[in-house]
Amino acid sequence: MSLFKARDWWSTVLGDKEEFDQGCLCLADVDNTGNGQDKIIVGSFMGYLRIFNPHPVKTGDGAQAEDLLLEVDLRDPILQVEVGKFVSGTEMLHLAVLHSRKLCVYSVSGTLGNVEHGNQYQIKLMYEHNLQRTACNMTYGSFGGVKGRDLICIQSMDGMLMVFEQESYAFGRFLPGSLLPGPLAYSSRTDSFITVSSCRQVESYKYQVLAFATDADKRQETEQQKHGSGKRLIVDWTLNIGEQALDICVVSFNQSASSVFVLGERNFFCLKDNGQIRFMKKLDYSPSCFLPYCSVSEGTINTLIGNHNSMLHIYQDVTLKWATQLPHVPVAVRVGCLHDLKGVIVTLSDEGHLQCSYLGTDPSLFQAPKVESRELNYDELDKELKELQKVIKNVNKSQGVWPLTEREDDLKVSAMVSPNFDSVSQATDAEVGADLVPSVTVKVTLQNRVALQKVKLSIYVQPPLVLTDDQFTFESMAPDMTRTVGFSVYLKGSYLPPELEGNAVVSYSRPTERNPDGIPRVSQCKFRLPLKLVCLPGQPSKTASHKLTIDTNKSPVSLLSLFPERYRIQSEQFEDLWLITNELIIRLQEYFEKQGIKDFTCSFSGPVPLQEYFELIDHHFELRINGEKLEELLSERAVQFRAIQRRLLTRFKDKTPAPLQHLDTLLDGTYKQVIALADAVEENQDNLFQSFTRLKSATHLVILLIGLWQKLSADQIAILEAAFLPLQQDTQELGWEETVDAALSHLLKTCLSKSSKEQALNFSSQLDIPKDTSRLKKHITLLCDRLAKGGRLCLSTDAAAPQTMVMPGGCAPIPESDLEERAIEQDSSELFTNHKHLMMETPVPEVSPLQGVTE
């Protein structure tokens, strides 16, 4: 046990999922026994009022049944509880309970019991006040110097002070410039109310000034007030503390000294009666509550401060005297006399942990054993280390963490895509035309060999494809068990997805003898959706905006055997060529594999259609820039809207409101602009998402054509995919253009460089959105030019070395000026041209989602 842990004398947990705050705890002799023993009064936001009188048999005992004197449901949230002389005609103590719209004063009494169950306690409502405004907090005291009774002052949420002279309502006053309520305290020495305003300054108001000021209901000043009748509410003194306050406490332990303590968010202040700072303490933690109390040293005051690290610090003025650990974060702390034990510290957490503790030490009885001192034999340690490294190396080479067969046989995941459409389409919210959008069923089967826990199956497809169900959860799976789940996939949107592949990922835990909770594992399985899910037959057309020619080293195959449902493919959208072209190559490869031909290859001899690709890049970049401008404009209008609101609020709260001067009209117009800009931002985000999906499709197509054109290997194509497709989606911090430009610059600097001068070029490590796309398009053109002149992609350590052998046609260096870049553009203009209306032997498709493909 820690030496400085709070000594638990008595503790309990209140209710179930109830909430509490700093005003919900009070200590007093509420039943007027006169023996000096305090009771613990606790109110909760759920409306429960509880009164405790702890009697632990031994230190650390929890609450017993007889410790709870009273528990009653008041049905309304309890904001604050206080005990004072609140009933006229008697000086006995009564309990005041503050609700959001009501103030109730009760008497608490006990009846001697004749049986072993003990005494019986009950509360009786003496009077109540219904509040016209929502309450925030309250304070009490002998306002105006009255003797033998306490008056109550309640602060509302809109900054109004309501004073009640016991059973009667006295008056209400609005604090000037009040925007948000702050903590409130009463100083009997100066007869003043002290609070912290939303301007982050401590303010003091004399009770007499409040009493003779204009009534809160009279919003207009009279002519008499305008001529200085003295009835305007004027602050006595102010002190700017520069932060919001958590609590205020006024202490006066003798007639010679009175202090105002203010607990800020980062500082702790002690003020004199006139607002001057006696001392302040900067806190290196986030405080949660505090309580000043009398010190044994004359002229000093002790203060308890709880923080969000579950610590309770005790200060003597600004000197830290003690620190103790609590089992919870306190939101309220009090000190009282319980069961003849003086100085008991009572703390309450926001979740209802109520604890009575005291300060002290608890020495640890544990003693660390003596360590045997012996000399180390470093030769033997080196030998043992080498043997262990050898064992680890062999294990990693042969079977990894555990045997490979065991890892593979834990769980097998397989997916089967139905060859036919669903008889009843599951596309209930599709956005593609007025016709019914088809859907196809996919079934995923899980087969496990051993017992598994926390099995979660997640399905992923590329938008605008959507799933009817994308998550399936199984708490546990017994050994040799098979589970099959089904879901449907359909197209939602008026554009094509960049890929038809889906992915089924299963995360699970495999229990072991050493780890019953299980070792986390992941398995996955990919599946391919049919092309007919996103395309439909259409009428043939002899003209097309975009066409491609794919060459093969074998005799042409009848497209009817590859595409029995269609044989002419053309497209009005460049990016829509990707899925059909890829499907054509895949079916050609499958066809020749079935024929037993293994040396079949495809090639592309035509120019790479970079101009069409650049148009998609420019459109995507334009939407990004437009989105930033719209968000900036929306932010400006939101700031303007809040500024107008503050102006109007100030006008409405002023006791002499000036004309609105069309502020309401300006507020309405600004509101409409904010709504219109928000709609425009949302529309632009949707367009940007669609544009990025189209850009990914076009990027796949360009990578495919470059690979066929230069006969790149799978590893080189993977490098291109990593460079051109680094992101799944654009974010505010990182976009596609700057990321791809950095990757291409790295390739041109390393594996595609020719001279050491190029390798020494430095590129910015910070990725910012560019001004335009000219640099990116130049780098893409230069990349294709380098590949055409013999450059090859490689990620080995020797890739950055200068090339000793020049490939046919040479390799142009990276341009160092705009003139050199323009020269390269002119040289390569014949190679990379606009290919609209380029005729070829086999026209390739025009395809739009679910339309445009015919036989």
Image (cartoon, rainbow, N blue to C red):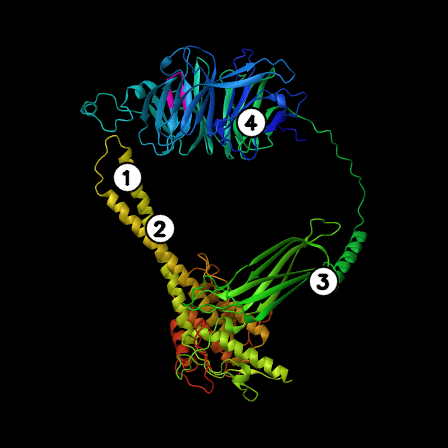
Residue type at mark 3 is Asp
Residue type at mark 2 is Ser
Of marks 1 and 4, which one's residue comes earlier in the chain? 4
Mark 1–mark 2 distance (CA, rounded to whole Å): 20 Å
Of marks 3 and 1, which one's residue comes earlier in the chain? 3
Pointer 1 and pointer 2: residues touching (CB < 8 Å)?
Answer: no
Residue type at mark 4 is Thr
Q: Please tell me whether mark 3 or mark 1 is closer to you in this view.
A: 3
Residue type at mark 1 is Leu
The residue that appears at 59% across and 13% down in the rendered structure is 112
Q: Please tell me whether mark 1 or mark 2 is closer to you in this view.
A: 1
Describe the element under mark 4 as helix, strand or loop. strand
Tell me the residue that label 1 is attached to.
648
Magenta span includes 192: yes
Q: Quadrant of the N terminus?
A: top right
Of marks 1 and 2, which one's residue comes earlier in the chain? 2
* Numbered range of the magenta stretch: 185-193
Pointer 3 and pointer 4: residues touching (CB < 8 Å)?
Answer: no
Measured from the top left, where is residue 556 in percent x and y?
54, 88
Describe the element under mark 3 as helix, strand or loop. helix
Q: In this view of the protein, which residue sits in the foreground, 454 or 781?
A: 454
Mark 2–mark 3 distance (CA, rounded to whole Å): 55 Å
Relative to 1, does residue 591 appear above or below in the rendering?
Answer: below
Dot 2 alpha-carbon crowd within 10 angstroms: few under 14, some 14 to 19, many 20 or more: some
Tell me the residue that label 3 is attached to.
409
The residue that appears at 66% across and 23% down in the rendered structure is 59
Tell me the residue that label 2 is attached to.
635
Mark 2–mark 4 distance (CA, rounded to whole Å): 44 Å
Of marks 3 and 4, which one's residue comes earlier in the chain? 4
Mark 3–mark 1 distance (CA, rounded to whole Å): 70 Å
Dot 3 alpha-carbon crowd within 10 angstroms: few under 14, some 14 to 19, many 20 or more: few
